[in-house]
Image (cartoon, grey):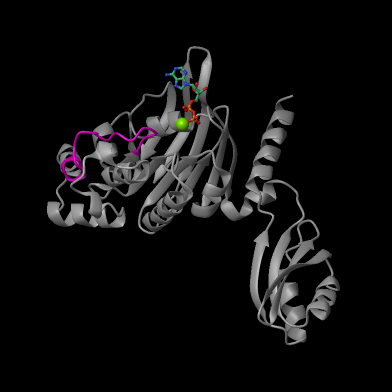
Amino acid sequence: MIEITNLVKNYGTKFAVDDISFRVGKGEIVGFLGPNGAGKSTTMNILTGYLSSTSGEAKVGGIDILENPYEAKKLIGFLPEQPPVYPDMTVDEYLNFVYEIKHCKLNREKHLMEIRMVTKIDDVRHRLIKNLSKGYRQRVGIAQALVGNPPVIIFDEPTVGLDPKQIIEIRNLIRNLGQNHTVILSTHILSEVQAVCDRIVIINEGKIIADEKTENITRVVEENRKYNVKVCGPQREVQAAIKGIPGVVEVEATGERDADSYTFQVEAEKGNDLRKALFYAMSEHNWPIIGLEAVGMNLEEVFIKIMDADLARKR
Ligand code: ADP
Ligand code: MG
């Protein structure tokens, strides 16, 4: 759905984007992760036709954004870093304005109502945008991106400046959008991509340093795997049985108790996926596993390691 090939953008001698290539398939939610100044906004602005590239190619739905900007832009809903809202309009006036400039053909009443519902802004539809809280204003920004129901959604740092509750709401909204849209979002927050995205593209100093499925990103660095496993059974015996599974480095009772079950943190040897072995070992004793999740997916650490590895390569 999105193809970026050898994209370069330089400002004088400064390469904001330095030979980036990646693809996003239909229906994927891809996170563009990188520190401030990495080149995320520049890439997104080129992809959405807001900025020209120095060289390289950006295509959306097979359409080149430079050759055919009008057709390509019809496929994209974009939330720029600074949402393009008009403070002196009401939410309704603004969405109608966007509907018109996009030459939207969908049933106006129905379409705008649906957008107000999914973005949860119906209750403020008659308010002036300048009087809205940052969270609502951001949702209005998202609403404008959804006008015309474009198949591709591009959000540049959609949760910046929001409080934790608003962040969760926006993430849920994005996840829901991902069910029938192709989504790219940028962020410098690692847990954000982890929570929302199928795939993570890590960018640093204008270059892609990792492009992985979210669950695989930890494999980029060699780390012992950890699991939280919740088992119904006698605490000591369960712990001893887990300890006896080949490949287990350590088992700790987390102290978390829930009726007749206990949670243990199990550390596995490098590259050893213990989940099946855990299942068989526990079922031998008739101790049901009622929860099992991988932990230690600390993207913060992963990110630092990947960047270090990248630096080491350059040296
Ligand atoms: P991000 O969105 O990842 O924070 P940007 O794409 O905004 O990063 O910026 C990438 C780099 O390009 C930064 O070093 C930034 O200072 C530089 N840059 C962006 N826009 C301009 C510009 N108009 N003129 C000069 N440098 C720019
Ligand atoms: Mg940016």
Q: Residue at x 75, y 80 (%)?
A: 282
Please identify the quarter of the rendering in which residue 307 is found.
top right
Q: Residue at x 15, y 43 (%)?
A: 96
- In percent of width and height, residue 24 lies at 45, 46
User: Which residue is situated farthest in the bottom direction here?
Assistant: 286
Asked whether 297 or 121 is in front, the reply is 121
Please tell me whether residue 48 is drawn above or below residue 225 in the rendered image. Answer: above
Asked whether 286 or 181 is in front, the reply is 286
Locate residue 125 relative to residue 18 in the image: left or right. left
- Residue 135: tell me if it is visible: yes
Q: Residue at x 78, y 78 (%)?
A: 235
- In percent of width and height, residue 305 lies at 71, 39
The residue segment tinted magenta is 79-94
Locate residue 129 relative to residue 180 in the image: left or right. left
- In percent of width and height, residue 26 lies at 40, 52
Locate residue 103 relative to residue 250 in the image: left or right. left
- In percent of width and height, residue 51 lies at 36, 25
Please tell me whether residue 50 is drawn above or below residue 269 in the rendered image. Answer: above
Please identify the quarter of the rendering in which residue 311 is found.
top right
- Residue 107: tell me if it is visible: no
**How many numbered marks appear?**
0
Asked whether 116 or 255 is in front, the reply is 255
Locate residue 61 relative to residue 239 in the image: left or right. left
Query: Residue 258 lies in magenta, yes or no?
Result: no
Main SS of residues in magenta: loop
User: Which residue is situated farthest in the front direction here?
Assistant: 131
Looking at the figure, which quarter contains the C terminus?
top right
